[in-house]
Each structure stands twice: as C-alpha cells, then as structure tokens.
Image (cartoon, rainbow, N blue to C red):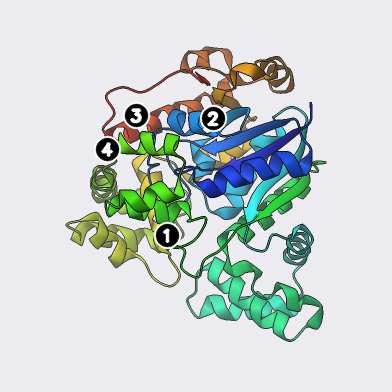
C-alpha cells in the first residue's frame, strides 16, 4: 500500500480541492490517499465554517480514503510551525511515499530550489532581509521583498523572485524544509493552483475557499453553488456559522488577561503584549481591537491567531511541550471499503484515537493536546450553533 498524504483545511472543500484529490492519486500512482486536516480552527486564526467531522466526511466522499486531524496547536501556527506539525503528523502515517499540496507555481524543482536557498541564506540576502525588517515589515513580507530584490541582481535565482509572494508556495517550501530536517524519504507532489488576479473573485473555474466563504457571508447561494459540489452545498445550507461569537470570546479574554502574562503566550514577542492589551482595553468590538493592534510588522492573521492562543491558554511553553511530544493520529473519517488501513495505522503509530474515549489509551505526554482539540471543538460548536459535538470517527 503506497500512500499520498495531503495537508488541508477544506474550509469548505471546493471543486478545486476535489481536482487536487483526484490529481494526487492519479499522478503519484498511490493506491491510498490520507488527508491530515485542520480541525476546528484554521491557520488564519478563524473558526472553520463546518464541523471537522463534516469536512472529513466530505473529503472521503470526494476521494480520500481516510482523514486524520492536524492537531489544533499546529493548525493555528505560523507557516513554518504549521508545516512542522503537518509533516510530523504525516510521518506517523503508514507507507507515505508522497506529500501532495497545491501551489501557485506548480513546480517541485523550483520549490526545492527555494528551500535550498532559504536554508543556506547568502550574507548579501541576509543584509537585505534585515533592512526590510528594520523598515517595519513583518518577517514573511520582508523575506518576500528581500528575495525579490536579491533575485533581480543574481540571474541564477531570477526564476525565484516572486515565489514567496504566494501563500501556498510559502507553505510548500516549509513542508520541504520540514521533511529534510526530519530526514524523511518522502517525495513531493504539487498541483498548480489555477489562480485569479483577485483571490476573492468567484469569476473563475476554481474559486478559492476564501472566495466561497465570502460569498456565503454575503448570502450569494448561486455563486457558492458554482464553486462547490452539490453534496457539500447541502452541508453549507444547514450551517449557522456566527463568527461574532468567537470574536466576543476572544475580545473578552484579551481584556481580562494580565498584560505581563500575555507575553508568555505563543508567538507574542516582547512589546507586542503591551500593544495587544492597550488595543483590547479600548475596543468595543473585536474588529476595533484588530485594527488598533495590527501594523506592517504585526499582520491581521497573526493577531487573530494570538487571540486564539489567549482564548485557549496556549503558551510558549505549551507549544514547546507539543514539539517534544510524540505524534498522534486522531481519525475523523474513513472509507468503509478501506478498513484495512486501521491495522497498519496502529502498527505505525503508538497513539491512534478513533474516538475521544480512546484518550485513556494514549501516551500521557500527548493527552493535553487531545484535550485541546476537544475544547476547540466545543468552542466551534458555539460558533456554528451546533447542539452537540461528535466524539467518534465517521464511516463513509
């Protein structure tokens, strides 16, 4: 059994995602497709529009053989740490030959070249990067600007000058870097994303999940129906996602937390804690807080993620404890025809959960992470106005 693993969010699953699932199986020649999917919250620091079990069920319906959860602590991390957690999870799966992801460039060799460059940065590039950071840019933006400038004057790297401008390229490079650091013999497969100049445009063959979410928020069901499968549309019609619930919870917690304690939370750098606290104290609405806190250096996505870290008490020490802990696999959905995967899964990884009650069977050092995933599911149930939360995997 050869496996291609796909790291995903499916928030929601679109026709473009289905195209990727089909291409990954066909182009790699693998008999098994397993997805490592973000659970209740996603990398932009927002709650998922559908419950993780619903999204996993849809993924299996559209071609995946199994879906496991990417632990919450990694799913809401910056790109490099997100990629580390994803690769750590994928490495615990059986017989993984390929890791597949979408990218704007669609070129594995170019992504690997960029990973090589960023792992061995020339001094000249470092000086350019420092200059852009000193000008107040966030690290991701400064890195993109620095590579663009460096590549313009070094012909050997001219093909890389725009590669860091696109988020899926950045994640792809991070996956490659993580695979190398873990010394894994996993091959890379990528599918070129069919891009539109406007990421939020629905006027394209494959609108992005961001565009679909915006169309849902603006109550444009006809546009949504063109971008997702009818089966997915049925789930979305029953969804009652209310992001203001999460926003109010986050703002309340940010107002309540001590400014000194805030510095201990994950990804809060020195000085940012004071900015966040002052922004929260003056804010009436979560949007007021975000607008007051964000700068060129501190992006909106980073501020949203930190709001989640504060809400769920995810500290720097907690993240390090997660890194030091063994991997675990929480199965969310499985194709009925592929129950044969489970014995191999359990043979390859000591910490496999099919339901929340399996918590008693796993290593003591990861129980806090599984409990975090479950707490996140409970909060998302409030956001999505769900009466109850599912505790066991779905057979599709």
- Tag 3 near tag 1, CB within 8 Å: no
x and y, in percent, of residue 64 in the image: 61, 32
Secondary structure beneath label 2 = helix
Asked whether disc 2 touches disc 3, contact meaning CB atoms under 8 Å apart, the reply is no
Quarter that holds the N terminus: top right
Give the side of residue 158 with respect to residue 208, left or right. right
Q: Which of the two discs, 4 and 1, labels the residue nearer the N terminus?
A: 1
Q: Alpha carbon of mark 3 to alpha carbon of mark 1: how far?
A: 32 Å
Identify the residue position indicated by label 4 in the image.
240
SS type, badge 4: loop
In the rendered view, does 174 fall on the left or right side of 249? right
Residue depth check, mark 4 versus mark 1: number of the one nearer the observer: 1
The numbered mark, 3 or 1, whose residue comes first in the sequence reads 1
Label 2 sits on residue: 61
How far across and down, in percent of the image, does residue 171 sit? Answer: 62, 55
Give yes or no for contact between labels 4 and 3 (Cβ–Cβ under 8 Å).
no
Residue in the image at 78% along x and 83% along y: 154
- Name the residue that disc number 3 marks: 378
Residue 302 position within the rendered picture, expressed as x and y whole percent measured from the top left? 44, 57
Q: Is residue 39 left or right of residue 363?
A: left
Label 2 or label 3, whichever comes before in sequence order = 2
Q: CA distance from mark 4 to mark 3?
A: 15 Å
Q: Residues within 10 Å of mark 4 (few under 14, many from 20)?
A: some
Relative to residue 357, is residue 259 drawn left or right? Answer: left
Q: Spatial distance from mark 2 to mark 3, Cα to Cα?
A: 25 Å
Q: CA distance from mark 4 to mark 1?
A: 22 Å
């Amino acid at each position: 059994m050869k496996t291609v693993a796909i790291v995903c969010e499916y928030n929601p699953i679109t026709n473009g995602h289905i195209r990727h699932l089909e291409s990954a199986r066909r182009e790699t020649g693998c008999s098994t497709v397993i997805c490592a999917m973000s659970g209740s919250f996603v990398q932009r620091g927002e709650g998922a529009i559908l419950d993780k079990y619903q999204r996993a069920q849809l993924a299996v319906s559209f071609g995946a053989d199994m879906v496991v959860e990417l632990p919450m602590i990694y799913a809401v991390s910056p790109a490099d740490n997100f990629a580390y957690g994803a690769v750590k999870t994928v490495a615990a799966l059986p017989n993984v030959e390929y890791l597949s992801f979408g990218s704007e460039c669609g070129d594995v060799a170019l992504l690997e070249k960029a990973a090589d460059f960023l792992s061995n940065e020339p001094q000249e590039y470092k000086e350019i990067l420092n200059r852009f950071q000193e000008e107040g840019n966030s690290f991701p933006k400064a890195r993109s600007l620095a590579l663009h400038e460096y590549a313009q004057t070094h012909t050997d790297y001219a093909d890389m000058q725009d590669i860091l401008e696109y988020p899926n390229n950045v994640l792809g490079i991070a996956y490659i870097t993580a695979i190398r650091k873990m010394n894994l013999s996993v091959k890379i497969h990528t599918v070129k994303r069919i891009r539109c100049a406007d990421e939020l445009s629905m006027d394209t063959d494959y609108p992005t999940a961001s565009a679909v979410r915006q169309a849902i928020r603006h109550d444009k069901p006809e546009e949504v129906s063109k971008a997702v499968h009818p089966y997915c549309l049925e789930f979305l019609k029953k969804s009652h996602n209310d992001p203001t619930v999460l926003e109010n919870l986050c703002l309340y917690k940010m107002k309540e937390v001590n400014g000194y304690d805030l510095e201990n939370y994950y990804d809060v750098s020195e000085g940012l804690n004071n900015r966040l606290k002052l922004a929260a104290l003056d804010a009436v609405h979560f949007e007021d807080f975000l607008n007051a806190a964000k700068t060129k250096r501190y992006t909106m996505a980073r501020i949203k993620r930190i709001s989640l870290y504060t809400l769920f008490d995810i500290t720097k020490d907690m993240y390090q404890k997660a890194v030091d802990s063994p991997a675990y696999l929480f199965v969310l959905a499985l194709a009925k025809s592929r129950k044969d995967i489970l014995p191999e899964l359990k043979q390859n990884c000591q910490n496999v959960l099919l339901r929340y009650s399996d918590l008693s069977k796993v290593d003591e050092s990861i129980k806090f992470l599984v409990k975090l995933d479950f707490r996140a599911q409970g909060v998302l149930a409030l956001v999505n106005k769900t009466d109850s939360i599912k505790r066991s995997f779905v057979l599709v």
